[in-house]
Image (cartoon, rainbow, N blue to C red):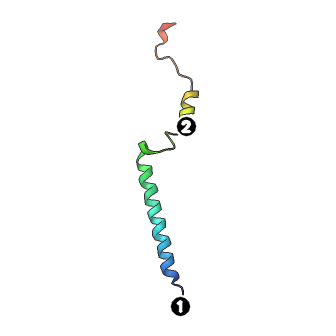
């Protein structure tokens, strides 16, 4: 029976981990494409914040 090649399996896991980290780093560099900031939670937060009057002379 053949022995399992653990070093090959470890190398494949490490390559997959590196690729995933690189994809995450690229996602963080592009703030406009971030789904977390354009999601419904951020829109609900924007609607809940009170808007101030930029012209206080209209009293």
- Looking at the image, residue 39 lies above or below residue 9: above
Image location of residue 56, percent across then percent down = 49, 12
- Looking at the image, residue 8 lies above or below residue 59: below
Q: CA distance from mark 2 to mark 1?
A: 54 Å
**Residue located farthest toward the right when viewing the structure as drawn:** 48
* Number of the label disc, if any, that sits on residue 40: 2
- Looking at the image, residue 30 lies above or below residue 12: above
The quarter of the picture where the N terminus appears is bottom right
**Residue located farthest toward the top when viewing the structure as drawn:** 59
Q: Residues within 10 Å of mark 2 (few under 14, many from 20)?
A: few
According to the picture, the residue beneath numbered tag 1 turns out to be: 2
The number of numbered badges drawn on the structure is 2
Residue at point 51% right, 76% down?
A: 10
47 sits left or right of 25 in the view: right
Q: Secondary structure at mark 2?
A: helix
Image location of residue 37, percent across then percent down = 50, 40
Q: Secondary structure at mark 1?
A: loop
Of residue 55 and residue 5, the one placed in the foreground of this image is: 5
Residue at point 50% right, 16% down?
A: 53
Q: Quadrant of residue 31?
A: top left
CB within 8 Å, label 2 to label 1: no
Q: Residues within 10 Å of mark 1 (few under 14, many from 20)?
A: few
Image location of residue 48, percent across then percent down = 58, 28
Residue at point 54% right, 85% down?
A: 4
Of residue 10 and residue 55, the one placed in the foreground of this image is: 10
- Looking at the image, residue 59 lies above or below residue 2: above
**Residue located farthest toward the front when viewing the structure as drawn:** 1
In primary-sequence order, the first of circles 2 and 1 is: 1
Image location of residue 21, percent across then percent down = 47, 60
* Number of the label disc, if any, that sits on residue 54: none
């Amino acid at each position: 029976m053949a022995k399992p090649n653990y070093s090959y399996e470890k190398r494949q896991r490490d390559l997959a981990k590196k690729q995933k980290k690189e994809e995450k780093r690229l996602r963080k560099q592009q703030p406009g494409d971030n789904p977390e900031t354009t999601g419904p939670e951020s829109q609900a937060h924007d609607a809940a914040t009170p808007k101030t009057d930029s012209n206080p002379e209209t009293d």
